[in-house]
Image (spheres, helix red, strand yellow):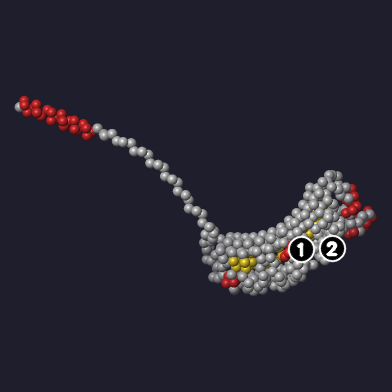
Amino acid sequence: MKTFLILLFPLILLLFSEVDGQRRPKPTKAKPPKPPKKPTRPPPEPVEPTDLPPPLPPGPPSVFPDCPRECFCPPDFPSAIYCDSRNLRKVPIIPARTRYLYLQNNFIDDLQEESFRNATELRWINLDNNRIRRVEKNILEKMDNLTFLYMERNQLKELPAFLPAHLEQLRLSRNQISKIPAGVFNKLEHLLLLDLHHNKLSDGIFNKNTFKGLKNLMQLNLAHNILRKMPSGVPSSIHQLFLDRNNIEEIPDDYFKDFPHLAFIRLNYNQLSDKGTPKNVFNVSNLLVLQLSHNRLASVPPISATLEHLYLNDNVIEKVNGTEICPYMVSFEVFSSEPEKIPRLRYLRLDGNQLKPPIPLDIMLCFRLLQSVII
């Protein structure tokens, strides 16, 4: 028995040592940190035409079954269709009942004949702020009742040809127009307003036949182009002529003598000087408003007795001689008994020149109806 115990004792010690070894955790080697992931590049921005915002979803069903799904047809105004500001790429099919069509603020780049095939009664179209580059040949010509056409802020490079004969207002400002096709106005005897400001029109475009056919034109706006000369061929029926923000340096003698109805001239922001301005060029009998600010004039040009508003601010005028610019002096007796013979000037701007107060007395004696003088 004693011998058995002596042999068993080492075996028990061995078992305890094995169990103790299993309880103790074995040391582990530290793993190296993982390198940070490289940031992924965002996908490139899509290019046109996929960068355009998607068209707006169609609105609720209209009471008119022929109303385009992209547009709004007001129940209380059945002759009008509003398709403006809807991210459209093309003009939908326009119903025959339409008189007034609003398509401004979209992404339309072309006008197709199919869209207007039934719209023969249109009187008003607004296509401002689109991307129109051209107009198919026979689209507009067939609109016999169209009187107002607005296509401002587009990408036209040429004035559209084959315009409807009854057009009264044509607004094409802020395009890229550098060409006017010959004879484009031949049938437009009803046109009253032609707005071509902020385009790329130059002197070579205009000749005596450019505006031929515009027998009743009242307002012509050629401001903010690249003209260096006064345009030729302007219709004699003109009432308002806007030529500001060009590079006009001189005006031919008697340029305005063939405009018996001309009442408003705007020539601000040009390069006019005394040398390029004949003495009596602005002495026009029916002229009411003359704007010559921001030029290089050193003296006040003679004016007619009928002129009411004269803008000469921001030139290089050093002195004003009232007796020289006064159409005629009026005695106190005439002022009291015949006021219609008094020079009509009421507003005069001379600020931004090299003048200093006070206002010369001879100006006040001549222009007795003056209400405001800015110097």
Q: Which residue position holds label 2?
A: 254
User: Looking at this view, is 272 or 222 the one in front?
Assistant: 272
Q: Residue flagged by tag 2: what amino acid is it?
A: Asp
Mark before the other along the chain sequence, 1 or 2: 1
**Residue 187 location (% of width, % of height):** 72, 73
Q: CA distance from mark 1 to mark 2?
A: 14 Å
Q: Quadrant of residue 4?
A: top left
Q: Secondary structure at mark 1?
A: loop
Q: Residues within 10 Å of mark 2 (few under 14, many from 20)?
A: some
Seen in the picture, residue 187 relative to 50 is either above or below; the reply is below
Seen in the picture, residue 342 relative to 167 is either above or below; the reply is above
Q: Secondary structure at mark 2?
A: loop
Q: Residue at x 67, y 60 (%)?
A: 174
Seen in the picture, residue 323 relative to 29 is either above or below; the reply is below
Q: Residue at x 84, y 47 (%)?
A: 318
Q: Which residue position holds label 1?
A: 231
Residue 143 shows in the view: no
Position of residue 217 in the picture relative to residue 41 (left or right): right
Position of residue 178 in the picture relative to residue 364 (left or right): left
Q: Residue flagged by tag 1: what amino acid is it?
A: Pro
Seen in the picture, residue 21 relative to 268 is either above or below; the reply is above
Q: Quadrant of residue 330?
A: bottom right
**Residue 114 location (% of width, % of height):** 57, 72
Q: Quadrant of residue 106?
A: bottom right
Q: Quadrant location of the N terminus? A: top left
